[in-house]
Image (cartoon, rainbow, N blue to C red):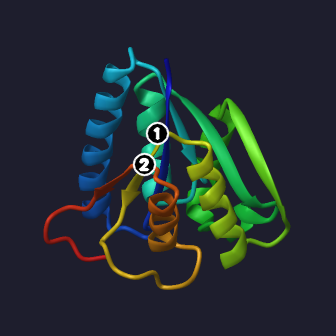
Amino acid sequence: MTTQLAITGHRGLSAELEAEVDRMIRAVVARTGAAETGAVVGVSCLADGADAVFAQAVLDAGGSLVAVLPASRYRETLPEEYQPVYDRLLARAGKVVQLPFVTPDPHAYMEAGKRMVDESDSLLAVWDGQPGRGPGGTADVVAYARSRGVPVTVLWPEGAIR
């Protein structure tokens, strides 16, 4: 039996914070995979930050990826230095879900978050617990998952500041 685990989380993490988040995510992915005989499917928008760290952790654990792309012009809005990483992760995705939006905006991001939650058994949130900086972000995806009864695991290093 496989477990579908979605990710939502902050972008623009410092290198130190990203390394700590990476350790935390890998621990959860390892536990999830071990509990389900090694089978974990990671559902991610593949953005820089928590999404990418999660996607790589899932692949390294022998799992598979479902990429949910908020809009057809999504890639060009990602940081230029991150785009090769995005391309590599996208190429390794076993399934790609392209939402019908052209330009990624708060509505497209929220719809992508909903789609990930709706296709998953649980949600992993790399979240500082603060309200979102705009609609469609981590806080909104967590609220949506909770409203749907989808279990949410929040990861955030003690004392870390975004």
User: Looking at the image, which is closer to me, 100 or 90?
Assistant: 100
| Residue 119 in view here | yes
Q: Is residue 36 left or right of residue 76?
A: left
Under circle 1, the secondary element is helix
> What residue did someone put label 1 on?
56
Measured as percent of width and height from the top left, residue 81 is found at: 57, 62
Residue lying at the far left in this picture: please name it.
159
Q: Which residue is mark 2?
A: 53
Left-right relation of 146 to 71: left
Residue 88 in view, yes or no:
no
Q: Is residue 139 left or right of residue 76?
A: left
Disc 2: CA contacts within 10 A as few (<14), some (14-19) or many (>=20): many
Question: Tag 1: residue type?
Answer: Gln
Which residue appears at 46% of the width and 68% of the height?
143
Label 2: which secondary element: helix
In the image, what residue occupies the spot 67% across and 50% down? 68
- Vertical placement of 40 versus 43: above or below? above
- Hey, which quadrant is residue 54 in on the image? top left
Q: Residue at x 49, y 53 (%)?
A: 51
Is 105 situated left or right of 14 in this image? right
Amino acid type at mark 2: Val
Quick check: marks 1 and 2 in contact, CB under 8 Å?
yes
Q: Position of residue 73 (x, y in %)?
A: 80, 65
Position in image of residue 65 (x %, y %): 58, 35
